[in-house]
């Protein structure tokens, strides 16, 4: 689940802040116990000095600390017995005097060895969800807001069924795709005229897949190309956003065909699509372009990947935004 560098950075900053807050709360809890029972503070201070006492005894005894260590062990045993008695008589839980880590698995570092801990993964998921919410807005991203009644129920000879029945199938397939998504899921191509719900269903898939803990990158094609161009020509050596597009579990490219078509955009689009296909990573592309225009506008290589490798979902119906405006 390779999240973008920005998301991981924000998640690590949150984890550090939460760890510092947890440490402050632990210290305050311990101080409150010590303030109530000052003798406990003194006993714990003396017990912590044991190592220094042993070392000092070694030097004083010309390298033979046996007798001194026996005395120290006796004193420590007496201190520990007194400590246990105080805890019992004052009804103090021994755990109240411990620094409790914010995460038992990683201690609050966010990593177990070289692997990201579940606590940091959860913060990454939350940061990604906030990022998607800011990008998509409150009107998109919930499958239950998809309205099939906006699609004509009348039979269409062009598609051999009604747009509503066709879109009902598309909707079911989109829900199933999101709920069963894995990084090796197939890539999808959403094609059809403007205002038929391609962006809406794409955003629903994005949110559902992200909520399940996968890394998702959602971008209109124009914004995606702008990011890639900026990193290539203006920030030499910076490839964070481009790498995020290549490495994320699911990449969603919206509104293909609305960007300015240049040699750079065609080359970059081919690199992204081809790299992800070769590495078996899922991609969803939505476009208003007629399918015959893909090869004309881009290249045979791009068209062959979109039409030959992606699963095509054709959207039919009337412009939903226009139908909504007529009802207002």
Image (tube, grey):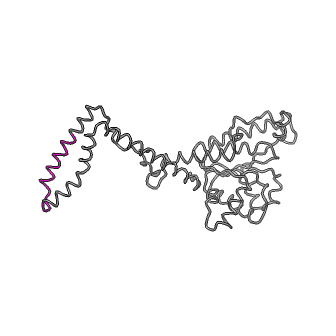
Q: Quadrant of residue 142?
A: top right
Q: Quadrant of residue 31?
A: top left
Q: Which residues are magenta?
A: 61-80
| Residue 218 spot, x, y in % from top left | 67, 50
Please tell me whether residue 69 belongs to the stretch shown in magenta: yes
Front one among 209 and 181: 209
Q: Is residue 269 left or right of residue 60?
A: right
| Residue 54 spot, x, y in % from top left | 19, 55
Q: Residue at x 62, y 45 (%)?
A: 130
Q: Residue at x 63, y 42 (%)?
A: 208
Location of the C terminus by quadrant is top right
Q: Is residue 16 left or right of residue 54?
A: right
Depicted 244 relative to depicted 160: above or below: below
Please tell me whether residue 191 belongs to the stretch shown in magenta: no
Q: Residue at x 75, y 47 (%)?
A: 190
| Residue 226 spot, x, y in % from top left | 71, 59
| Residue 267 spot, x, y in % from top left | 72, 64
Counting the numbered discs, the total is: 0
Q: Is residue 198 left or right of residue 17?
A: right
Most frequent secondary structure within the magenta stretch: helix
Depicted 122 relative to depicted 149: above or below: below
Front one among 133 and 157: 133
């Amino acid at each position: 689940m390779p999240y973008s560098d920005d998301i991981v950075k924000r998640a690590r900053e949150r984890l550090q802040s939460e760890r510092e807050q947890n440490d402050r709360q632990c210290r305050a809890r311990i101080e409150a116990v010590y303030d109530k029972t000052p003798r406990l503070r003194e006993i714990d201070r003396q017990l912590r000095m044991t190592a220094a006492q042993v070392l000092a005894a070694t030097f004083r005894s010309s390298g033979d600390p046996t007798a001194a260590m026996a005395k120290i062990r006796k004193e420590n045993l007496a201190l520990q017995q007194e400590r246990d008695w105080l805890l019992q008589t004052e009804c103090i839980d021994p755990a109240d005097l411990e620094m409790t880590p914010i995460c038992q698995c990683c201690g609050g570092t966010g990593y177990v060895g070289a692997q990201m801990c579940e606590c940091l993964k959860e913060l990454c998921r939350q940061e990604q969800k906030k990022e998607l919410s800011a990008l998509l807005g409150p009107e998109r991203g919930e499958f239950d807001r998809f309205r099939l009644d906006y699609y004509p129920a009348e039979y269409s000879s062009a598609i051999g069924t009604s747009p509503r029945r066709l879109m009902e199938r598309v909707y079911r397939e989109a829900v199933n795709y999101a709920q069963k998504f894995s990084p090796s899921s197939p890539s999808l191509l959403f094609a059809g005229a403007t205002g038929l719900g391609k962006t809406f269903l794409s955003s629903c898939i994005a949110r559902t897949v992200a909520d399940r803990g996968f890394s998702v990158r959602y971008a209109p094609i124009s914004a995606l190309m702008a990011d890639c161009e900026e990193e290539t020509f203006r920030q030499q050596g910076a490839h964070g956003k481009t790498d995020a597009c290549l490495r994320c579990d699911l990449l969603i490219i919206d509104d293909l065909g609305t960007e300015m078509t240049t040699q750079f955009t065609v080359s970059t689009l081919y690199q992204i699509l081809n790299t992800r296909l070769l590495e078996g990573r899922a991609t969803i592309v939505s476009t208003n372009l007629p399918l015959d225009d893909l090869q004309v506008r881009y290249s045979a290589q791009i068209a062959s990947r979109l039409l030959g490798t992606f699963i095509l979902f054709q959207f039919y119906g009337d412009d939903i935004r226009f139908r909504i405006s007529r009802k207002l």
